[in-house]
Image (tube, rainbow, N blue to C red):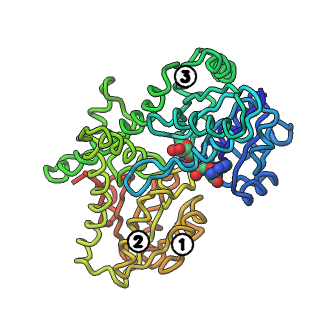
Amino acid sequence: MNLTVIGTGYVGLVTGTCFAEMGNTVTCVDTDPAKVANLKQGQIPIFEPGLDVLVKNNVKEGRLRFTTSLAEAMIDSRVYFIAVGTPSNGDGSADLSQVLGVAGEIGQHLTEYGVVVDKSTVPVGTAEKVRAVIESELQKRGQNIAFDVVSNPEFLKEGAAIEDFMRPDRIIVGTESDRARDIMRQLYAPFNMNRDRTIYMGVRDAEMTKYAANAMLATRISFVNELSRLCEEVGADIDQVRRGIGSDRRIGMPFLYAGLGYGGSCFPKDVKALVHMFRQHGLPPQILAAVEAVNTGQRRRFIDGILRHYRNAVAGKTFAVWGLAFKPQTDDMREAPAIDIIGTLRRKGARFRVHDPVAMETAAAVLGGRGIEYQADAYEALRGADALLLLTEWHQFREPDFARMRRLLKRPVVFDGRNQYDPAQLRKLGFTYRCVGRA
Ligand SMILES: NC(=O)c1ccc[n+]([C@@H]2O[C@H](COP(=O)([O-])OP(=O)(O)OC[C@H]3O[C@@H](n4cnc5c(N)ncnc54)[C@H](O)[C@@H]3O)[C@@H](O)[C@H]2O)c1
């Protein structure tokens, strides 16, 4: 099949590449000319394990191409995936300007029946707005062309995006149209070879499913973080409690880690958008309001712990930082805890020597250079620092050379926002060790 994917970010590039890998011919469109020029040269704009090889192979074999022109991309294709950003507006609602802008463009160039697929995360009712915008453009052109709008939210995780897209837990397709359903079935058939993972439902059900999934995961994180506070007070260890409850099959292990709270490009904005939807409909978002409050408080608690340790006097202190990205295996800095933590301590006069295995460039674009030295080597970041702040749980930080760390740090102090180390071991090695929810 010939497809167009509009928006070549984390979702669009992975979607387009994986469909090309299955034999489709895919044109990826982005309004960012530099991004498109780089992609044409085989340069991938993001860090995503395995993506570069797949992009290069599919470009070489002529199944994947890149352009800034949607009109050009639409000439041969009848399926148009919208994978542009849906950031938060000031009031928490999802900003649909990119999605509806693309819908308008599709309406300007549609020449025969097509399926418009919302892959971006969008509030319930957006497919109808997309339809209305396209219809209005067709009307302006005096055209009466049939088309369907399908909701097909994406569930990939950054850092494991290829694996998630190729072997998804489920594929959600929201449509009321038999014609569109058949096209989506055919398109996803290669991903359903061993069993059909597709769940067909109404458009509104699909739109809601995406928000419900992210909100559920965010709730688990905030639940454990809230519990971790009580653990600190009563002398229990949240990590033991996590194992204790996660082993119950009804609960399960994932997303039960206490730490710095959720960040990234999805959970914060999607929880906010869902809260906004509740309020719009006159319903109090009781659980979700608490989820958000706990999450914001969690970073604050970590910062307060550092300030308490130094009796509020962090001016002139130097902190080594391991990990800047919002989670391991990505260079995405959107809503990364490092931004708040470094930002707050920097305003109080602290300086930093920071290291991240892949996110140095994206971090520098967000954090700038004032008071921050970016170190290519993790151990070099420790040299002469008053303490280490561990902010992202990259694998390579799990079992470091503690003796070397002690030698390089001015003082053997570790603030571990990700509970990576054994408190007893670190104390035995002479470290002052602070972590989350483990008294
Ligand atoms: N990142 C994730 O892990 C993830 C996972 C699931 C769902 N989502 C959802 O998918 C959507 C996209 O997320 P993302 O992280 O890929 O965003 P992104 O910011 O990485 O990429 C969006 C891209 O769209 C491009 N763009 C904007 N307007 C355009 C237009 N009119 N025409 C063509 N291109 C345009 C931008 O230049 C950018 O490259 C969001 O709704 C997000 O919530 C993201």
Q: Quadrant of residue 175?
A: top right
Q: Is residue 407 visible?
A: yes
Is the CB of mark 3 within 8 Å of ligand 1?
Answer: no
- Which label's residue is closer to the chain start, 1 or 3? 3
Q: Quickly name the residue at label 2.
A: 343
In 3D space, how far apart are the residues under numbered discs 3 and 2 (Cα atoms)?
45 Å
Is the CB of mark 1 within 8 Å of ligand 1?
Answer: no
Q: Residues within 10 Å of mark 3 (few under 14, many from 20)?
A: many
| Residue situated furthest right in the rendering | 61
**Vertical comparison of 112 with 322: above or below:** above
Residue 241: give x, y in percent of width and height.
25, 39
Residue 378: give x, y in percent of width and height.
53, 65
Residue 204: give x, y in percent of width and height.
45, 28
- Which label's residue is closer to the chain start, 3 or 2? 3
**Vertical comparison of 132 with 310: above or below:** above
Task: Name the foreground residue: 118 vs 71.
Answer: 71
**Vertical comparison of 274 with 310: above or below:** above
Instruction: Identify which amino acid the numbered label 1 is placed on.
Output: Glu
| Residue situated furthest bottom in the rendering | 316
In 3D space, how far apart are the residues under numbered discs 2 and 1 (Cα atoms)?
22 Å
Instruction: Identify which amino acid the numbered label 2 is placed on.
Output: Gly
Task: Name the foreground residue: 283 vs 215.
Answer: 283
Q: Quadrant of the C terminus?
A: bottom left
Q: Quickly name the residue at label 3.
A: 175
Which of pointers 1 and 3 indicates the residue nearer the eye? 3
Q: Quadrant of residue 318?
A: bottom left
In 3D space, how far apart are the residues under numbered discs 1 and 3 (Cα atoms)?
54 Å
Q: Is residue 46 visible?
A: no
Which of pointers 2 and 1 indicates the residue nearer the eye? 2
